[in-house]
Image: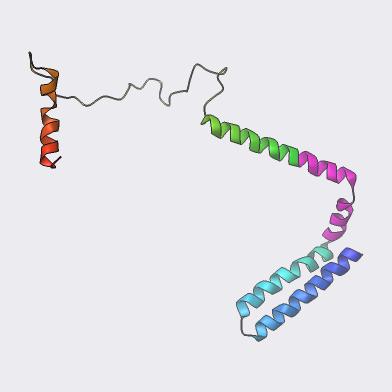
Amino acid sequence: MLAETICSAVSAAGLGIAAITAYRKRFLSAARIAAYSLVPLGLVMTGAVDWIADTAFSPVAWAGFGVLGLAWVLFLSTRAVERRRGGRKEATGGAGPGAVAPAASSPSRAVTAKPQAGATAGEDFSDIEAILKKHGI
C-alpha cells in the first residue's frame, strides 16, 4: 500500500513538472518528462509494484539474485580469461593454434636478385644504397 502511494505521488509530481515545462514552451522536454512520470503509475496499475514489494522482502528471492550474480561473475571471468589467452584453445585440447585453412601453403617471400657468382655479401646492398642516396640519407 505504501509503495503504491509513493509511486502515485511521484507520477503526480512528474506530471506537474511536465506541465510547468510545457508552459515554458519546451514541449519536447515536457513530453519526455510526462512519459517518465507515467511509468510508476503504469507499474502500480499492472500490479508489478506488489510483486516487486513482495520480492524485496523475500529471502528466497535474494538468494536467487545472489545465484544470478554468481553466474554473471563466472561469465565475466571466463570471458576475461579467454581474452587474456587471445582466443587460443586450452593447451591440453590441441597441439597448437588451429589454422584457418590447414591445406594452404605458407606465404611466399619476395624474390630478390641473387648475387653474382664471386660477389661478396657487401655488394648485394647496392640497390639499398642507391635508394638511400636518392633520399639524401
> Which residue is outermost to the right?
1
> Which quarter shows the N terminus?
bottom right
Q: Is residue 36 above or below residue 65?
A: below
In the picture provided, is 80 more to the left or to the right than 39? left
State the image quarter where residue 13 is shown. Answer: bottom right
State the image coordinates of residue 106 (x, y, percent, origin top left).
32, 22
State the image quarter where residue 108 is shown. Answer: top left
Front residue of 8 and 124: 124
State the image coordinates of residue 56 (x, y, percent, origin top left).
86, 52
> Which residue is outermost to the front?
137
Q: Residue at x 66, y 82 (%)?
A: 22
Q: Residue at x 83, y 73 (%)?
A: 9
> Which quarter shows the C terminus?
top left
Q: Is residue 63 above or below residue 97?
A: below
Main secondary structure along the magenta-highlighted residues? helix
In the picture provided, is 12 more to the left or to the right than 86? right
Q: Which segment is the magenta one?
A: 47-68
Q: Residue at x 54, y 29 (%)?
A: 85
> Which residue is outermost to the top?
118
In the picture provided, is 54 more to the left or to the right than 38? right
Magenta-span inclusion, residue 21: no
Q: Is residue 48 above or below residue 98?
A: below
Magenta-span inclusion, residue 67: yes
State the image quarter where residue 23 is shown. Answer: bottom right
State the image coordinates of residue 6 (x, y, percent, origin top left).
85, 68
State the image coordinates of residue 102 (x, y, percent, origin top left).
41, 21
